[in-house]
Image (cartoon, helix red, strand yellow):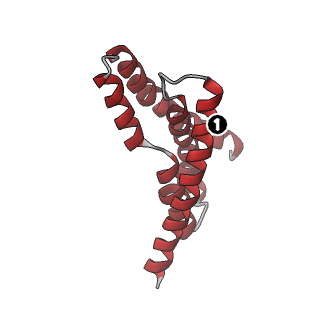
């Protein structure tokens, strides 16, 4: 039964995360006014990196959240909210469109700033819960 509850938590988190991804990504992309660069995907990935850094700090140092809550948030919600498969596809679209410069920039920002956002999330959490 515990396994079923965890799977339901992940599924519900995935449902919520997918809807949030659609709304946030679309909102950012609309505001950017760009049709050439996927700012929406970039934004949800960076936001997701920050949030996972923040929350994993709390899980590791404060034992926050039950297993079901961690499954809901970290696996379901954030797994659905961040869009690495979309990132891969959009990078390939840029490459196939001959925009190697944009593909390199897009990939670099995701990797470098994404890791920095995880680190910043942990720093913010550690500053709050000292």
Q: Is residue 57 above or below residue 40?
A: below
36 or 116: nearer the viewer: 36
Q: Is residue 66 left or right of residue 6?
A: right
Quarter assignment of residue 13: bottom right
**Could you tell me which quadrant the C terminus lies in?**
top right
Q: Categorize mark 1 by other alpha carbons within 10 Å: few (<14), some (14-19), many (20+).
A: few
Q: How many marks?
A: 1
Picture coordinates of residue 100 (x, y %)? Answer: 32, 17
Furthest residue toward right: 128
Residue 80, above or below 90:
below
Q: Quadrant of residue 34?
A: top right
Residue on which disc 1 sits: 27
Say which residue appears at 56% left-offset and 58% top-offset: 73
Q: Residue at x 50, y 32 (%)?
A: 42
Q: Nearer the viewer, residue 100 or 2?
A: 100
Specify the farthest residue to the top. Answer: 101
Nearer-the-camera pick, 33 or 85:
33
Instruction: Estimate the x, y position of residue 110 in percent, counting from the top left.
Output: 44, 30
Can you tell which quarter of the image residue 107 is in? top left
Give coordinates of residue 62: x percent, y percent: 61, 56
Which residue is painted at 47% across and 81% down in the image? 2
Q: Which sits in the foreground, 49 or 40?
A: 40
Q: Position of residue 98 (x, y in %)?
A: 30, 17
* Residue at (62, 31) in percent of width and height: 30
SS of the residue under disc 1: helix
Image height of 95 relative to 123, above or below: above
């Amino acid at each position: 039964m515990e396994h079923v509850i965890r799977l339901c938590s992940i599924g519900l988190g995935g449902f919520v995360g997918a809807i949030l991804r659609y709304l946030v990504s679309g909102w950012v992309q609309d505001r950017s006014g760009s049709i050439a660069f996927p700012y929406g995907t970039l934004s949800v990935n960076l936001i997701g990196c920050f949030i996972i850094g923040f929350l994993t700090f709390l899980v590791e140092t404060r034992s926050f959240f039950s297993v079901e809550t961690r499954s809901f948030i970290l696996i379901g919600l954030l797994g659905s909210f961040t869009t690495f498969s979309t990132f891969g596809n959009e990078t390939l679209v840029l490459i196939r469109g001959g925009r190697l410069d944009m593909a390199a920039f897009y990939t670099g920002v995701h990797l470098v700033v994404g890791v920095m956002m995880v680190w910043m999330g942990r720093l913010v959490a550690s500053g709050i819960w000292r």
